[in-house]
Image: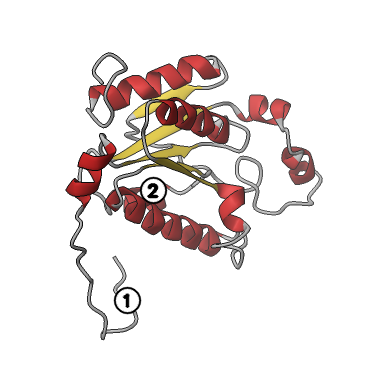
């Protein structure tokens, strides 16, 4: 990990700790890291999972790719270096959210394996859950709700993942969802079941 530029800073410990927040919230903090091509279903599933967890009383927040680029990362483009910095910042924000006892859901293409692995390393084992929304380029392009693939094919969007830029597939994702075969509801059920299995959240009958 890169060290901060300034050598004159000290981490400030809070009086209220993470365990206190989790006890108050009634669930553990964790990061659900949705990754996959554009139009593979990341944002859709993140929103649906958040709704289920919210209805159970969980404290959640979604970090969505486009939303974050409107503010925190508005200075970044889509070059390899900017993509790396984009994901680095998101990993740090997600880490803070976990420390606050939230379930953070991130929906980013995050095409580079090293970037995802670096963010995984920010958290203790079991708290970073990588969810690969596996979907063929052909199906993603067929969906294309924003018209991005069409623009990429026309050369209007350079370095577009899946067309003119690479996507490095996860090698050890906690969950692989074939979103061109499974329905969104089936995907959500599998995600929530995994959270229950790992005791991050309790089941509806355990509350």
Task: Name the mark on residue 117.
Answer: none
Q: Is residue 182 above or below residue 121?
A: above
Which coloring applies here? secondary structure
Tell me: 132 left or right of 38.
left
Residue 198 visible in the snapshot: yes
Q: Position of residue 62 (x, y in %)?
A: 48, 43
Between 147 and 172, the residue placed more toward the observer is 147
Q: Tell me what residue is drawn at x 29 percent, y 46 percent.
A: 101
Front tag of 2 and 1: 1
Q: Quadrant of the C terminus?
A: top left
Tell me: 146 left or right of 135.
right
Q: Tell me what residue is drawn at x 47 percent, y 59 percent.
A: 84
Q: Quadrant of the N terminus?
A: bottom left
Q: Which residue is mark 2?
A: 116
Furthest-front residue in view?
24
* Label 1: element kind: loop
Q: Which residue is mark 1?
A: 4
Packing grade of label 1 (10 A; few <14, some 14-19, many >=20) is: few
Q: Tell me what residue is drawn at x 33 percent, y 19 percent.
A: 193
Q: Position of residue 144 (x, y in %)?
A: 71, 32
Q: Quadrant of residue 142?
A: top right
Q: Position of residue 19 (x, y in %)?
A: 18, 47
Between 158 and 207, the residue placed more toward the observer is 207
């Amino acid at each position: 990990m890169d060290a901060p530029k300034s050598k004159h800073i000290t981490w400030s410990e809070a009086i209220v700790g993470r365990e206190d927040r989790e006890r108050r919230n009634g669930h553990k903090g964790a990061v659900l890291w949705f990754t996959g091509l554009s139009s593979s279903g990341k944002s859709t599933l993140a929103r649906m999972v958040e709704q289920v967890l919210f209805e159970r009383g969980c404290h959640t927040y979604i970090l969505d790719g486009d939303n974050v680029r409107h503010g925190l990362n508005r200075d970044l483009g889509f070059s390899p270096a900017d993509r790396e910095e984009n994901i680095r910042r998101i990993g740090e924000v997600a880490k803070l959210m976990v420390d606050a006892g939230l379930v953070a859901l991130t929906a980013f293409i995050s095409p580079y394996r090293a970037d995802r692995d670096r963010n995984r390393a920010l958290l203790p084992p079991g708290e970073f859950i990588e969810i690969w929304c596996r979907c063929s380029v052909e199906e993603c392009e067929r969906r294309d709700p924003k018209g991005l693939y069409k623009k990429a094919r026309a050369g209007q969007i350079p370095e577009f993942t899946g067309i003119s830029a690479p996507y490095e597939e996860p090698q050890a994702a906690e969950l692989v969802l074939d979103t061109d075969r499974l329905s969104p509801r089936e995907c959500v059920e599998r995600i929530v079941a995994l959270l229950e299995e790992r005791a991050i959240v309790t089941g509806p009958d355990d509350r």
